[in-house]
Image (cartoon, rainbow, N blue to C red):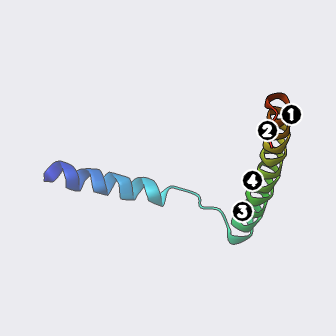
Amino acid sequence: MNKITSFLKEVYEELTKVTWLGRKDVIRSTIAVSFVVILVAIYVSLVDLGLNAMLKAILGGR
């Protein structure tokens, strides 16, 4: 039990040293990540549609 208490105290001490991002930085980062995710989703969808069309043409699908 003593090891757990010691560990939790050390964790708390380390967390007090962390520099947290400000609200504006978090919002900017969230928007940037969302934009990149949307772009990647569009790209993957287009590649999937293209490969699907090619396979249908090759295999004579409906």
Residue density around tag 1, few if under 14, some if 14–19, many if 20 or more, within 10 Å: few
Instruction: Identify the amino acid type marked 3.
Output: Thr
Query: Is 19 or 46 nearer to us in this picture?
Result: 46
Q: Dots 2 and 3: beta carbons under 8 Å?
A: no
Residue at label 2?
61
Is label 3 in a helix, a strand or a loop?
helix
Of the numbered discs 1 and 3, the one sitting upstream in the chain is 3
Q: Is residue 24 left or right of residue 54?
A: left
> Disc 2 and disc 4: Cα gap in Å?
32 Å
Q: Nearer the viewer, mark 2 or mark 4?
A: 2
- Seen in the picture, residue 17 relative to 49 is either above or below; the reply is below
* Residue contact at pointers 3 and 4, CB within 8 angstroms: no
Task: Locate the C terminus and report the quarter of the image it occupies.
Answer: top right
Question: Which residue corresponds to mark 1?
Answer: 57
Q: Given the image, on which type of amino acid does mark 4 rest?
A: Val
Where on the picture, by quarter, is residue 43?
top right
Task: Please give left or right for residue 18 compared with residue 27 in the image.
Answer: left
Q: Give whichever of discs 2 and 3 has the lower sequence position.
A: 3
Q: Are marks 1 and 2 in contact (CB under 8 Å)?
A: yes
Q: Which residue is mark 3?
A: 30
Question: Which residue in the structure is indicated by mark 4?
Answer: 37
The amino acid at mark 1 is: Ala
Identified at 78% across, 44% down, the residue is 44
Q: Earlier in the sequence, mark 1 or mark 4?
A: 4
Q: Position of residue 14 (x, y in %)?
A: 43, 53
Q: Residues under labels 2 and 3: Cα distance?
A: 42 Å
Residue 36 in the image, given as x and y percentages of width and height: 79, 52
Q: Position of residue 60 (x, y in %)?
A: 82, 33
Sequence-first tag of 2 and 4: 4
Q: Give the label on residue 24, or none.
A: none
Instruction: Depth check: give the residue in front, 2 or 49.
Output: 49
Circle 2: residue type: Gly
